[in-house]
Amino acid sequence: MKKLLLIIWLSLWTLALTWCNKWPSEPYTIENPTDNFQEYSPVALASAQEAGDTTVIYFWASRCPGCMALKDDIIAKSDTIPEGVTVLAADFDLAVDLKEKYGVSKKHTTVYIKPDGTVATKNTNKEHSLEDILAGVQSLDSI
């Protein structure tokens, strides 16, 4: 009986996790975008690259508490993003082509793009603060 209950519990848990990953995000926009932090768009990416910026694309989903905490941290501290760095927030559920382009399969992923447009690195370690992202940008100098 205990084994049966365990199997049922594990099955339900697996279904819940699977559904959560497919559950679409609710719309969320940055109310006060800045030059160095805004929603992803092809124009925003092209503009950052034209300016010679290192660009970080952050894939988030509103159903992901860690994603939203990081996005809130970036918004709160966006004035500390140094010149020459642009952070773009991409909705994991809506940015299907972008995910395919950069090989993103998990929400809460950051893609670091050098000023010349080459992908330097991709991180799925679930950075938890803007400082973590900026440390990742600084480490690109050694790549």
Image (cartoon, rainbow, N blue to C red):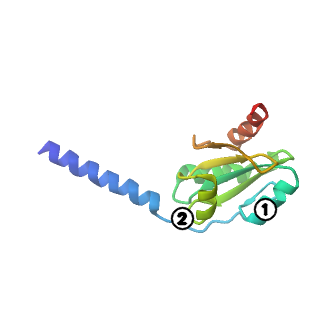
Q: Which mark is residue 25?
A: 2
**46 to the left or right of 5:** right
Q: Residue furthest top?
A: 142
Instruction: Specify whether residue 35 is in view.
Output: no
Q: Is residue 98 left or right of residue 141?
A: left
Could you give the CA–CA distance between mark 2 and mark 1, rounded to whole angstroms? 21 Å
Q: Earlier in the sequence, mark 2 or mark 1?
A: 2
Taking the spot 71% from the left edge, 63% from the top edge, the residue there is 30
* Quarter of the rendering occupied by the N terminus: top left
**Marks 2 & 1, CB-CB < 8 Å contact:** no
Q: Residue furthest bottom?
A: 27
Mark 2 is surrounded, within 10 Å at the Cα level, by few (under 14), some (14 to 19) or many (20 or more) other residues, namely some
Along the viewing direction, whichever of 141 and 116 lies nearer the viewer? 116
Q: Secondary structure at mark 1?
A: helix
Residue 15 falls in image quadrant: bottom left
Please say whether residue 98 is visible from this viewpoint: yes
* Amino acid type at mark 2: Ser
- The residue tagged 1 is 44
**Which is more foreground, mark 2 or mark 1?**
1
Measuring from the top left, give residue 64's x and y in whole percent. 52, 54
Residue type, label 1: Ala
Residue 31, position as x, y percentages in the image: 73, 65
Q: Residue at x 60, y 68 (%)?
A: 27
Estimate the x, y position of residue 98 in percent, counting from the top left. 64, 60
Callout 1 environment at 10 Å: few (<14), some (14 to 19), or many (20+)? some
Q: Does 36 sit left or right of 133 as displayed?
A: right
Q: Position of residue 107 (x, y in %)?
A: 55, 53
